Image (cartoon, rainbow, N blue to C red):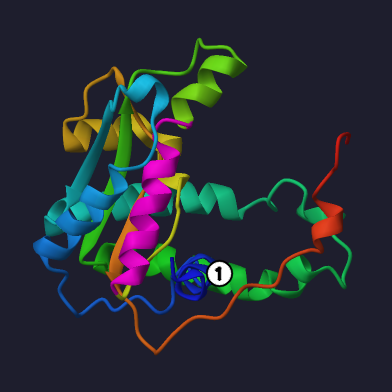
């Protein structure tokens, strides 16, 4: 296995917002290739109860973007949980302004992306315990991340977003999603502009890894 290529893919699959190319069309063949790869991800008990909604229709993309912006206005009115405790020299704090402007750009232009993908899973988690919830999301999120990696390898960018879930039922009604199906995220998909991406700044490994105990 060419670990150099694999490592480059894993360290440069970024959240792409400002560099999404809104004008270039995305081919169905490329999306199908990436979705086929995503379905090779592991899933609980091999049930494969995932569903992927690919939204191309301009009117539906516009309405989903309106739902997203409505949620974004609520989200943007308060700092993200835990952000107030970051030191000024923290690598996460150093990019806070860029993340904010990038998020605003996406909210304002989401309707312009040529494709939106909503990974879903059959079932609901509201009444489940932690074990059930972990197993449930563990059966779809690996596939969604594999999809993002496959897209990146073919020159497409995307970004993990969840704000539309604040109004999940409104989105479900728009798209005809059954009541017993859970939406997990919304991925805006487009070719990206520019040549490449760099690895992101991260906190030291020693701050996040415990060996044998917390």
Quadrant for the N terminus, please.
bottom left
Front residue of 40/180: it is: 40
Location of residue 9 with respect to 64 vertically, above or below: below
**Residue 138, placed above or below residue 127:** below
**Label 1, residues with CA under 10 Å away: few <14, some 14-19, many ≥20:** few
- Residue 69 in the image, given as x and y percentages of width and height: 41, 54
Q: Residue furthest bottom?
A: 195
Choose between 34 and 182: the one closer to the eye.
Answer: 34
Q: Is residue 62 visible?
A: no
Please, what secondary structure does the residue beneath circle 1 have?
Answer: helix
- Outermost residue toward the front in this view: 1
Q: Which residue is denoted by mark 1 in the rendering?
A: 11
Where does residue 112 sit, x and y in percent of width and height? 25, 69
91 left or right of 149?
Answer: right
Rendering quarter of residue 86? bottom right
Percent across and percent down for residue 48 are: 28, 28
Residue located at (31% from left, 55% from top): 65
Q: Which region of the structure is painted magenta?
A: 138-154
* Predominant secondary structure, magenta span: helix
213 part of magenta stretch: no
- Image quadrant occupied by the C terminus: top right
């Amino acid at each position: 296995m060419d670990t150099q290529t694999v490592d480059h893919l894993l360290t440069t699959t970024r959240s792409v917002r400002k560099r999404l190319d809104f004008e270039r069309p995305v081919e169905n063949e490329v999306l199908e290739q990436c979705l086929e790869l995503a379905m090779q991800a592991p899933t609980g008990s091999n049930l494969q109860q995932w569903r992927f909604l690919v939204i191309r229709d301009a009117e539906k993309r516009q309405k989903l973007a309106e739902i997203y912006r409505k949620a974004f206005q609520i989200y943007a009115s308060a700092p993200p949980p835990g952000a107030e405790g970051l030191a000024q020299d923290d690598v996460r704090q150093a990019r806070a302004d860029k993340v904010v402007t990038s998020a605003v750009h996406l909210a304002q232009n989401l309707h312009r992306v040529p494709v939106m993908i909503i990974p879903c899973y059959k079932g609901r988690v509201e009444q489940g315990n932690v074990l059930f919830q972990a197993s449930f999301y563990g059966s779809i999120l690996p596939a969604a991340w594999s999809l993002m990696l496959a897209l990146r390898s073919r020159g497409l960018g995307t970004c993990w977003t969840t704000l539309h879930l604040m109004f999940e039922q409104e989105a479900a009604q728009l798209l005809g999603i059954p009541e017993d199906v859970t939406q997990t995220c919304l991925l805006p998909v487009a070719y990206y502009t520019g040549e490449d991406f760099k690895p992101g700044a991260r906190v030291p490994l020693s701050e996040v890894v415990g060996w044998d105990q917390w």
